[in-house]
Image (cartoon, rainbow, N blue to C red):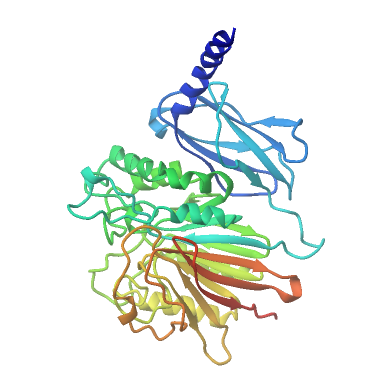
């Protein structure tokens, strides 16, 4: 009898194991809104996928997303929408492949944004952020020691229990076999997204992303990259962002609001003029995107205005791909002058790219103070010369030259709101803390 029970148990577990094996990566939470949350997933082959979800306090009342048939043309990815949700609630969810429920040894849960205006104080929330995710793949990497390391950083970030994560570009590293074909681009994104250490963080934190040169194209690539439409297509396939530009302004461009903070996500690659092109009035954002950025800043009524961008903005060193370098300084100055002219307080640039972490602060008497938070890298190589860079706006004590991530908490009530900024290394050691108090008009 005992053997019979064991055999029956094995027979029932075989279908479940087969469906679990179909999972390539994810589930990953996308943006959080009051009435909608997308959940991204990728499988290894054609199958049917759905998400069952329920409010944590009412597990017997379940909802289901639409069933999606996974297709090769989309790299077997799907965005499934939880659209029977209410504001300010916590939900749990389960993944079904071919009507078989998958099992995970980490939480699968999400939270919708709360309705708080005219009702109370803005909700507190935390963010993790950074750039530079290189996952080694020996047969396609350069010879020698692998460029990627310290993958445990993603497990450390998960343990911090952030509400949101913002990927600041170079979220994957396209390589020579990748950037000239759709197959290569999708394969590279798949390889990075499938990292084992990354999966728990994907499943219970809401993710937003911009891109930079290495997920856009080759190193230091610009708007002339011939295959940018394909990399943009891949970006849309792999990231459940709120939007991807506009009808007349394509790109890795988006916007979202969370609590009393506006996040303006800009694309510094799609419209960028070549670094090597001569001239001092070059554009990095393009005319339309620059105008949209200005309009977004001046229209914002939120406490903090966060501009999310791939490369550094305030750094005064004319080296690497800082905004002040390669003929883009006038456009940078135009943005700063616009902030001054319109007296827009509490603007913070959130950037990556440079393979080190640092905070910058631009102060002029009688003008709004502008901050920049640069977090890099997660797993790619560290810039070991960062301490030699002459940056007049650097905040002392915030330079980090090791694998790390940024941690930000927007805390306090409406009258005592503040932003706490920290950096942690790959193993969770705190490297610095800095506090930004908003200016109230």
Is residue 18 toward the left or the right of residue 215 in the image? right
Give the residue at the far right of this rendering: 119
Give the residue at the far front of this rendering: 2
Q: Quadrant of residue 67?
A: top right
User: What residue is drawn where x is 40% and y is 86%?
Assistant: 392
Give the residue at the far left of this rendering: 143
User: What residue is drawn where x is 49% and y is 66%?
Assistant: 429
Picture coordinates of residue 349, whole percent (x, y): 50, 71
Q: Is residue 86 visible?
A: yes
Image quarter (top left, top right, bottom left or bottom right) of the C terminus: bottom right
Picture coordinates of residue 2, whole percent (x, y): 58, 11
Is residue 109 toward the left or the right of residue 355 in the image? right
User: What residue is drawn where x is 69% and y is 73%?
Assistant: 417
User: What residue is drawn where x is 32% and y is 66%?
Assistant: 382
Considering depth in this image, is 106 or 282 the residue closer to the camera? 106
Q: Quadrant of residue 414?
A: bottom right
Picture coordinates of residue 362, whole percent (x, y): 49, 83
Asked if residue 153 is positioned above or below residue 415 in the image, the reply reads above
Considering depth in this image, is 283 or 210 the residue closer to the camera? 210
Count how many numbered circles sit on residues in the image. 0
Is residue 350 toward the left or the right of residue 342 in the image? left
Asked if residue 227 is positioned above or below residue 44 in the image, the reply reads below
Picture coordinates of residue 297, whole percent (x, y): 57, 69
Asked if residue 72 is positioned above or below residue 163 in the image, the reply reads above
Give the residue at the far bottom of this rendering: 365
Considering depth in this image, is 99 or 149 the residue closer to the camera? 149
Q: Is residue 70 visible?
A: no
């Amino acid at each position: 009898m005992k053997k019979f029970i064991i055999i029956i148990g094995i027979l029932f577990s075989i279908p479940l194991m087969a469906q679990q094996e179909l999972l390539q990566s994810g589930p990953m939470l996308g943006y959080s809104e009051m009435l909608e949350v997308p959940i991204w997933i990728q499988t290894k082959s054609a199958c049917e996928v759905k998400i069952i979800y329920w409010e944590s306090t009412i597990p017997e009342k379940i909802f289901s997303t639409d069933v999606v048939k996974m297709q090769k043309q989309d790299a077997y990815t799907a965005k499934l929408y939880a659209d029977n949700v209410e504001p300010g609630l916590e939900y749990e969810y389960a993944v079904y492949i071919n009507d078989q429920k998958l099992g995970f040894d980490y939480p699968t849960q999400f939270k919708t944004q709360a309705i708080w205006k005219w009702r109370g104080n803005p909700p507190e929330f935390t963010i993790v952020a950074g750039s530079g995710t290189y996952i080694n793949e020996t047969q396609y990497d350069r010879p020698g020691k692998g460029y990627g390391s310290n993958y445990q950083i993603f497990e450390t970030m998960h343990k911090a229990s952030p509400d949101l994560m913002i990927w600041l570009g170079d979220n994957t590293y396209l390589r020579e076999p990748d950037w000239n074909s759709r197959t290569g681009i999708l394969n590279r994104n798949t390889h990075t997204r499938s990292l084992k250490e990354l999966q728990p963080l994907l499943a219970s934190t809401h993710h937003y992303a911009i891109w930079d040169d290495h997920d856009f194209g080759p190193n230091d690539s610009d708007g002339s990259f011939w295959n940018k439409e394909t990399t943009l297509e891949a970006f849309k396939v792999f990231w459940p962002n709120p939007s991807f530009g506009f009808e007349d302004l394509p790109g890795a461009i988006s916007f979202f609001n969370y609590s009393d903070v506006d996040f303006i996500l800009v694309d510094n690659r799609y419209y960028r003029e070549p670094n090597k092109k001569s001239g001092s009035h070059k554009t990095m954002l393009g005319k339309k995107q620059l105008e949209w950025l200005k309009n977004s800043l001046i229209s914002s009524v939120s406490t903090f205005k966060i501009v999310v961008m791939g490369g550094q903005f305030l750094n005064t060193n004319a080296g690497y791909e800082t905004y002040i370098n390669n003929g883009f300084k006038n456009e940078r100055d135009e943005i700063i002058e616009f902030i001054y002219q319109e007296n827009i307080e509490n603007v913070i640039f959130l950037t990556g790219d440079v393979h080190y972490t640092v905070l910058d602060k631009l102060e002029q008497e009688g003008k709004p103070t502008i901050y920049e938070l640069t977090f890099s890298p997660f797993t790619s190589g560290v810039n070991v010369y960062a301490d030699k860079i002459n940056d007049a706006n650097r905040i002392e004590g915030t330079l980090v030259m090791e694998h790390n991530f940024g941690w930000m908490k927007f805390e306090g009530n409406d009258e005592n709101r503040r932003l706490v900024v920290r950096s942690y290394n790959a193993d969770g050691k705190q490297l610095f803390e800095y506090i930004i108090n908003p200016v109230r008009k």
